[in-house]
């Protein structure tokens, strides 16, 4: 069942389950709450295993402050209550202890989301904070004041971070995005640091009329959904970040930006054909993907995403050399790179991809992989990010010794990587 279809109390349980499963908090750490239409707050309990919560464990706080439930509410209830009372648009709050976020909190630095549009759009400006005792009224006041000023992503010195949104799906997306941002920034340090573009180029999802798009293909829909769930589990896509598209004889199938890859199903996949879409859903990269298919007829699948290690190369504006191990080079070949300004030039992007250059990095934006089928496009994104992680792990120890040109020629003569 989709998160949005659960009861408010069940949403809190499911959200904490996802946060814990993604290693964004510990057994005892973090707290999540949601506000229902009657003004009741449902919040995770204090001191109870976050990996085994059930709806029976969730505390309920009535508008008059009366608490019901078998456990004591989280000690951070004061700042949750203050945020709901102050910010009428907020219906869900996530506070957790992702290691990368905690690292920024302990440095007492608010990370900049300006290195990539996806971070800035989801998180907005990230508020700095100051330390106060967890659960104290002082901490509640500090956090409330930040949200009162309009921030929706707030760092907490020597503590963590809190995000708030109008629904639980968005709040989860924000916290996961903040975690990916902080990891990306740390990774980018090994490459000279993140470089923010002066301004972000608007990239608006195309508006297509909903209509009859011809014969359906349930198999393609199921495949895309299954690969996206795998990609989410493997940290190749985030909640709201990543588009996987497959070309069929009569159209292109793709996932919409609004659908979480955690629980996406075949029925969520949208079909584009002859200027129409099968459902009123959008994908920001659809027009770019259509152009890539047009210019690369051998490609049957396109994957666009920004996993953290790969994103580090993009935000650091750094070249990626795939000559690491034969398997990396066979799959990735010559990884192209375009400046950020090219993001709106779909012809340029499409022309930069080919059978011999099936992977492309766009500075401060994303990575694109193509393949002769969905498995190849997926595998390339996976190999790209695994390889990026390997390079970043090696950087503090010694320089990478790349496979030489003679060895590359030997690989090319022995393997057809396409």
Image: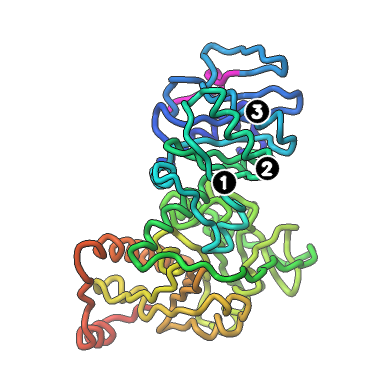
Select label 2 or label 3 by which is in front. 2
Residue drawn at x 58%, y 45% is: 153
Are there few (<14), some (14-19), or many (20+) residues within 10 Å of tag 1? many
Residue at the image position 58 percent from the left and 33 percent from the top:
142
- Residue designated by label 3: 82
Q: Nearer the viewer, residue 130 or 371?
A: 130
Quadrant of the rendered image containing residue 203? bottom right
Mark positioned earlier in the residue sequence (2 or 1) = 1
The N terminus, quarter of image = top right
* Label of residue 149 in the image: 2
Give the mark nearer the N terminus: 2 vs 3.
3
Secondary structure of the residue carrying numbered label 3:
helix
From this view, report whether residue 117 is shown above or below residue 363.
above
Q: Is residue 296 above or below residue 75?
A: below
C-alpha span from label 2 to label 1: 10 Å
What secondary structure is marked by label 1? Answer: loop
- Residue 27 occupies quadrant: top left
Residue 225 included in the magenta stretch of the image: no
Q: Crowding at label 2, few (<14), some or many (≥20) Cα neighbours within 10 Å?
A: few
Tell me if residue 365 comes above or below residue 36 in the rendering. Answer: below
- 112 lies left or right of 191: right
Q: Position of residue 373 (x, y in %)?
A: 47, 70
- x and y percentages locating residue 69 in the rendered image: 58, 13
CB-based contact (under 8 Å), mark 2 and mark 1: yes
Q: Circle 2 — which element?
A: loop
Q: CA distance from mark 1 to mark 3?
A: 17 Å
Q: Residues within 10 Å of mark 3 (few under 14, many from 20)?
A: some
Q: Position of residue 375 (x, y in %)?
A: 44, 65
Say whether residue 218 is visible: no
The residue that appears at 57% across and 23% down in the rendered structure is: 137
Residue hosting label 1 = 127
Q: Which residues are magenta?
A: 51-59
């Amino acid at each position: 069942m989709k998160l949005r279809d659960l009861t408010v109390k069940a949403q809190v349980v499911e959200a904490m389950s996802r946060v814990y499963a993604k290693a964004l908090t510990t057994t005892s750490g973090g707290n999540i709450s949601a506000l229902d239409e009657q003004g009741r707050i449902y919040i995770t309990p204090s001191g109870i295993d976050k990996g085994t919560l059930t709806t029976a464990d969730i505390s309920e706080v009535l508008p008059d402050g009366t608490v019901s439930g078998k456990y004591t509410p989280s000690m951070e209830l004061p700042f949750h209550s203050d945020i709901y009372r102050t910010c009428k648009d907020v219906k869900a709050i996530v506070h957790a202890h992702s290691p990368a976020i905690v690292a920024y909190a302990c440095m007492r630095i608010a990370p900049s989301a300006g290195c990539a549009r996806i971070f800035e759009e989801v998180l907005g400006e990230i508020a700095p904070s100051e330390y106060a005792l967890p659960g104290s009224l002082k901490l509640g006041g500090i956090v409330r004041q930040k949200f009162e000023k309009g921030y929706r992503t707030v760092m907490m010195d020597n503590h963590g971070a809190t995000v708030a949104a109008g629904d639980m799906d968005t709040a989860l997306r924000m916290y996961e995005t903040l975690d990916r941002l902080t990891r990306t920034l740390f990774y980018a340090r090994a490459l000279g640091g993140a470089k923010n573009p002066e301004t972000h180029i608007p990239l608006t999802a195309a508006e297509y009329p909903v209509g009859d798009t011809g014969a359906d293909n349930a198999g393609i829909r199921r495949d895309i959904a299954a690969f996206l769930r795998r990609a989410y589990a493997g940290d190749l896509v985030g909640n709201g970040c990543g588009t996987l598209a497959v070309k069929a004889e009569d159209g292109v199938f793709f996932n919409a930006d609004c659908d979480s890859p955690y629980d996406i199903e075949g029925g969520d996949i949208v079909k584009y054909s002859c200027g129409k879409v099968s459902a009123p859903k959008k994908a920001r990269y659809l027009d770019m993907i259509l152009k890539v298919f047009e210019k690369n007829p051998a490609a049957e699948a396109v994957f666009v995403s920004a996993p953290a290690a790969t994103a580090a190369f993009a935000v650091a504006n750094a070249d990626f050399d795939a000559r690491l191990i034969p398997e990396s080079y066979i799959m990735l070949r010559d990884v192209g790179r375009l400046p950020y300004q090219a993001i709106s030039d779909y012809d340029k992007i499409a022309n930069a991809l080919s059978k011999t250059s099936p992977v492309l990095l766009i500075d401060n934006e994303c990575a694109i992989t193509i393949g002769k089928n969905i498995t190849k496009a997926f595998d390339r994104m996976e190999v790209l990010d695994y390889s990026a992680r390997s390079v970043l792990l090696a950087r503090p120890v010694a320089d990478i010794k790349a496979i030489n040109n003679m060895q590359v020629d030997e690989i090319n003569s022995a393997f057809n990587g396409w």
